Structures are given as C-alpha cells and as structure tokens.
Image (cartoon, coloured by chain):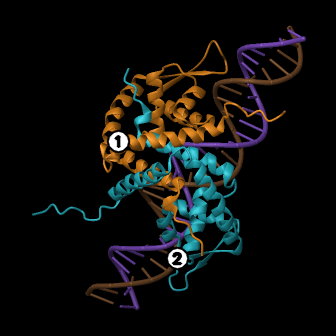
Chain colours: A cyan, B orange, C purple, D brown
Amino acid sequence: MAAVDLTSHPGHLARRLQQAHYLLWNTMVSEEITSPQFAVLNALVAEPGLDQRTVGERVGLDRSTIAEVISRLTRRALLDKVRDPQDGRRFLLALTEDGLRTHRKLTVRTARMNQVFLSPLSAEEQTLFLELIQRVSDAAEGLRNPAEPLVDQG
Amino acid sequence: MAAVDLTSHPGHLARRLQQAHYLLWNTMVSEEITSPQFAVLNALVAEPGLDQRTVGERVGLDRSTIAEVISRLTRRALLDKVRDPQDGRRFLLALTEDGLRTHRKLTVRTARMNQVFLSPLSAEEQTLFLELIQRVSDAAEGLRNPAEPLVDQG
DNA sequence: CCCAGATAATCAGGACACTGAGCATCTCTC
DNA sequence: GAGAGATGCTCAGTGTCCTGATTATCTGGG
C-alpha cells in the first residue's frame, strides 16, 4: 500500500556499501585481518603507545568493540598490551614485529582494493564521493557530543 | 613510519557513515525496530507472501541474517510465517496488523530522519550522493555473481 | 588522609553480518 | 519411481557494533 523506495534511503545504502566493501576486502586484502583490525594497526603505527580508549577514538570504535578487536589482535601476537606504570587504569598498546609486517603487507593490498572499489567512478567523482560521505558522517557524529549545550536560561 | 590516512579509505568512511546512521536512527526513529528490520517490513508491504530467501535478496541480507531478523519480528508478532503448501521448503511471510501499523508509523519518522541525515548537503549533492553510493555498491555486488563466467578455454 | 567524582577497562546482553555444514524438500532425468 | 542435483532453511562459529552496569584506579577538595 505504502511501501518506500529504499534506494532513496542513505542508511540502507550505507549498509549495502559496507557489505560491498566487506566482500571486496575479503577477496582482495585478507581473510584473517578485518578492516577495523587494520585500522587499529594503522593507528598504532602512527602513534605507538596509545591506550585502548584513545585508539578507539582514532578509528571510531566504542569502548566495548575496541576491547574485543584488541583482544583478537593480542591473541594473534600482532600487538602487545602493557599496564601503564604511570596510570594503573590504562593499557599501553604497541605493535609487535609481526604486527608491523602485517600492516606493511596489508597497506599495499588495501590501496589496490580501494582503486577497484572506486573504479566505477571518475577521478572527480571519487574525490567528491569521499568528501560527501565525510561531511554527512561528521555532521551526524557532531549531534552525539553537542560541543556547546545551547544556553537556554535567561 | 608508514601509517595511512583512513579518510581516503572508502571502507572506513562507509563504516563511519553507518555508525552515524545508527545513532540518528536510534534517536529519531525507534529504539525497538532497527533499520534492517524496517527494510524487511517494507519489503513485505510491497510484496506480501514472499519467502525468506527472496526477502533477503530484496533488502540485501544473507540467508542466516534474514533468518534471525525474521525470527525477531515474528517473536514481536509483527509478521506471520506459514509453510508454503505448494513447496514444503518455503515459509511464506506476511505482516500482521501490528506490523502494518508499525511500518506506517516508522515510514513517517524515517523520512524525517533522512532529511536531517542529509541536511549537511545541498539538494543536488544529496541526489548525487545517493547515486554515487549506489553505483559503487552495485559494481562491487556485481563481482560476487559473475553474470558470464568468462570463457577461458580454447 | 579520605572520600567523592571522573576515568579506563571489563562484563553481560542484544542485534547485525558472513561462511561452511547439514537437513528437508522439490525437480529433473533416466 | 528412484537417484542426483538444486533449493530453502537451520545451526555452529566468528567478528563487528551498541548500551548499561560493574570494577579498579586516579585526582581533587576538605
């Protein structure tokens, strides 16, 4: 009676986009390491010694998810986890030799995959595409932590 | 040493986009019904009496995931599941009165949410955005089932 | 010094999302 | 009509994702 066309729903399309990416990642990059796991490795290459929460912030994962991802990476000996002697609540994270090697290897493959993934778009469209996604995500993200809680008392 | 800028990675951005959408959906549409669940309801409004596999195909969910989603919707009495008398393997699915009501209610809220979600973009950008996502997803999806398996024997 | 609030991590519980394996049913062919 | 292959569904296992509650630790005020 009143069904909607889901192709005009950005949320639905976002889900499909991620599935498409998952598929391509699995065939072109790795069946062992997932895309979020690579993001964590990458964050620790950029800034070794970060704590869990901060890594999560860098790659966009909440406290629970980042804990799980890190536990898997630790189990596979791709990163080390040490109590911060300065602050007993924190764990300091850093890649192992194996983690570094893995990151290097996957970086190359990831670049190739991104090319294939975006190949249906022209060069200008690709740039625009990335920019549009980012603007939409950033805006919605902003709604989560209202920077200024809107003064509404006289 | 060689960390990558994830903002140029469409996969990473796709994940962030979906998280942003999840957040907005949760606050503006429903905390009970998820976006994939709404997609299933919507598919059954359009075509009542579909079987599980076909619904999954319509909304982009694999056989296992669609089974779980349907089991949740059935548990909440939003849809009915009946053995196909013509084909004992199939279950025929159709919305209950409650399911129809829920779909109607959420359709309105979803439209509002989509507006907010896309509001950082101009009207032209919005159209373009949806089109670009779809083109990328469709292309990657196409790699899954090669329509013509490329004859390579002389 | 001690306690209250903030902060890092864990745990429990729920919802997607995929693959591979297995079961029931249908269908096609001989 | 009996076996072979295809097809719809379920189940087991893994990996994101989220929220709410709990635990351990730190910090600041009295």
| Residue B28 in the image, given as x and y percentages of width and height | 33, 44
| B34 vs A59: above or below | above
Can see residue B48?
yes
> Around disc 1, counting alpha carbons within 10 Å, would you say few (fewer than 14), some (14 to 19), or many (20 or more)?
some
Q: Residue A95 carries which label?
A: none
Identify the amino acid type marked 2. Answer: Arg
**Residue on which the image places disc 2:** A90
Of labels 2 and 1, the one closer to you = 1
Which quadrant of the rendered structure holds the N terminus of chain A?
top left
Which residue corresponds to mark 1? Answer: B114
**Residues at badges 2 and 1 in contact (C-beta under 8 Å)?**
no
Label 2 environment density (alpha carbons within 10 Å; few <14, some 14–19, many ≥20): some
Give the amino acid type for the residue marked by disc 1 in the picture: Asn
Q: In which quarter of the image is residue B123?
A: top left
Judged from the image, the secondary structure of the residue bearing numbered disc 2 is loop
In the displayed structure, A120 sits above or below B13; it is: above
Q: Distance between the residues labelled 2 and 1?
A: 39 Å
Name the residue rendered at 31%, 34% in the picture.
B108
- Residue depicted at x 46% and y 43%: B132
Give the number of marks.
2
- The image position of residue B120, as x and y in percent, is 32, 51
